[in-house]
Image: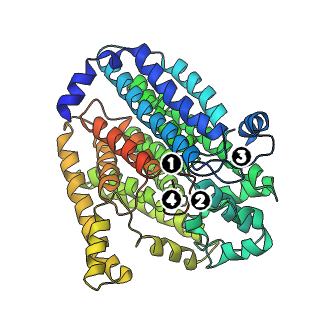
């Protein structure tokens, strides 16, 4: 693989114009899939404004295309787009390492146009936005999205929302934090009975957050060009985070804000603010705790125990305040979700072997949970050691930990890579970039669907 990468890095792909053309083609193919909804890679019966416009021209009755060859073609288009986006990203990074110095403000402007189009297209590659909308609708109607069977309650009272939820999640209470629920509820309060409007609001909020992170990186990074290429102009991330409308964008926003503050400030109140930001991130998805551990790691090694204590107390107080609105029962779905295992994680094979030997999923959850956490720490330490010691540890440690999580976790998707990508924007050139890009695209190809196609179908 390294030999192939070295050869490609000096090929025509590293020409900036060719690289940007590949990235643009990859994004265009992804947008084409969203524009031609509904299909096997998009949400059922959801046409956001631009998708609706295209559908009215090509398919005035909004009739769903039949399964089979059409779905195979749709999937091939999206997979081709993912691969082209990866090649385009690699080419731009190689060109940058060979002296290409684009204006990051122009890259941000171009990405703003792409994001503006994408948030008006039906989400591609996942049904998560439908779940967000359903949980938001439940919360806006005064019910608790963390209680069992709340989605079944929604089926009886607002079937339009329930019917777009992925087939796998029809009985799953929310595994997202209270901050995520408040964002979802805000969108649903605007959308009301219109699930399409709610999803559109969620897409817009997500797109704004993605661009806000890009602006923060542009203003605060030591190398704004590299940071912009890794985030704002990263076609792989745009497709996964913006095109899919995933809340991992919000977690990444909290992560990079905390990292940049930790690098540049040392006052009591800045430590408290860092803790609050991490707490807010955990209120979206619990994975933000990895950033907290990554920040604490170098501080503890330097003996800065008081700083770590302030950050930890502020983060715990913030999380406690958030969950006080729903109670400890809101944590139950989260703990249940920690038992999930899926391919391509190697733990899927461990679980399969255990089940054949007479074990149960519940019984195997604890040993697998312990083993993968140990493996994560080992991989994180190896990555941490491979990156030059003269790099800021407040950046290297969060990257090492979040990258290790992506590699060894039993349950992971392409959009989860938002955390290591946003941390990597602050790490100077290193070999981990290629592996993160490869892992992201492999996950994108493995887990890419509208979330509603039953097993055994394309």
Q: Is residue 245 left or right of residue 159?
A: left
Q: Nearer the viewer, mark 2 or mark 1?
A: 2
| Residues under numbered marks 1 and 3 in contact, where contact means CB atoms less than 8 Å apart | no
Q: Identify the mark nearer the N-term, 2 or 4.
A: 4
Kindly report the distance in space between the C-alpha atoms of the residues bearing marks 2 and 4: 33 Å
Q: Residue at x 63, y 40 (%)?
A: 34
Q: Label 1: which residue?
A: 254
Marks 1/3: CA distance?
23 Å
Above-or-below relation of 427 to 251? above
Foreground mark, 1 or 3, reads 3
Mark 4 Cα shell of 10 Å, populated few (<14), some (14-19), many (≥20) = many
Element under disc 1: helix
The residue tagged 3 is: 200
Residue 411 percent across, percent down from the top left: 40, 62
Find disc 4 in the rendering and name its residue: 279
Disc 2 versus disc 4: nearer the observer: 2
Of the image marks 4 and 3, the number of the one nearer the N terminus:
3
Label located before the other in sequence (2 or 1): 1
Helix, strand or loop at mark 4: helix
In this view of the protein, which residue sits in the foreground, 334 or 133?
Answer: 133
Say if 407 sits above or below 432 in the image.
below
Residue located 41% across and 20% down the image: 19
Q: Nearer the viewer, mark 4 or mark 3?
A: 3
């Amino acid at each position: 693989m390294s030999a192939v990468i070295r050869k490609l890095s000096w090929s025509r792909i590293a020409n900036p114009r060719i690289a940007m053309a590949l990235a643009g083609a990859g994004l265009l193919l992804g947008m084409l899939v969203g524009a031609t909804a509904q299909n096997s890679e998009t949400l059922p019966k959801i046409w956001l404004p631009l998708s609706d416009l295209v559908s009215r021209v090509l398919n005035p009755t909004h009739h769903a295309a039949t399964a089979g060859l059409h779905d195979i073609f749709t999937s091939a288009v999206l997979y081709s787009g993912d691969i082209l986006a990866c090649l385009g990203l690699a080419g731009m990074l190689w060109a940058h390492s060979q002296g290409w110095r684009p204006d990051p403000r122009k890259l941000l402007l171009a990405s703003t146009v792409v994001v503006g189009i994408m948030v008006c297209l039906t989400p591609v590659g996942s049904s998560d936005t439908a779940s967000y909308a359903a949980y938001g609708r439940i919360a806006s109607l005064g019910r608790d999205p963390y209680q069992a069977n709340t989605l079944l309650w929604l089926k009886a009272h607002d079937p339009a929302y329930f019917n777009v939820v992925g087939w796998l999640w029809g009985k799953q209470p929310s595994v997202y934090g209270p901050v995520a629920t408040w964002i979802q509820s805000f969108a649903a309060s605007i959308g009301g009975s219109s699930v399409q409007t709610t999803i559109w609001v969620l897409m817009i909020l997500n797109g704004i957050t993605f661009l806000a992170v890009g602006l923060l990186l542009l203003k605060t990074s030591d190398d704004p060009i590299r940071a912009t290429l890794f985030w704002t102009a990263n076609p792989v991330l745009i497709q996964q985070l913006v095109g899919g409308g995933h809340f991992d964008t919000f977690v990444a926003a909290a992560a990079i804000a905390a990292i940049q503050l930790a690098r540049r400030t040392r006052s009591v109140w800045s430590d408290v603010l860092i803790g609050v930001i991490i707490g807010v991130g955990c209120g979206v998805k619990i994975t933000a705790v990895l950033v907290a551990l990554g920040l604490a790691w170098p501080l503890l090694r330097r003996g800065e125990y008081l700083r770590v204590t302030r950050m930890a107390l502020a983060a715990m107080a913030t999380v406690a305040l958030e969950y006080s609105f729903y109670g400890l029962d809101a944590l139950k779905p989260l703990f249940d979700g920690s038992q999930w295992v899926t391919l391509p994680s190697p733990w899927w094979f461990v679980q399969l072997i255990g089940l054949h030997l007479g074990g149960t999923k519940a019984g195997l959850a604890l040993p697998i949970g312990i083993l993968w956490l140990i493996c994560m720490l080992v991989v994180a330490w190896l990555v941490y050691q491979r990156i030059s010691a003269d790099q800021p540890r407040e950046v290297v440690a969060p990257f090492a930990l979040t990258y290790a999580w992506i590699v060894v976790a039993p349950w992971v998707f392409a959009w989860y890579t938002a955390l290591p990508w946003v941390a990597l924007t602050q790490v100077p050139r290193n070999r981990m970039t290629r592996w993160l890009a490869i892992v992201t695209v492999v996950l994108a190809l493995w887990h890419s669907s509208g979330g509603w196609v039953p097993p055994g179908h394309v």
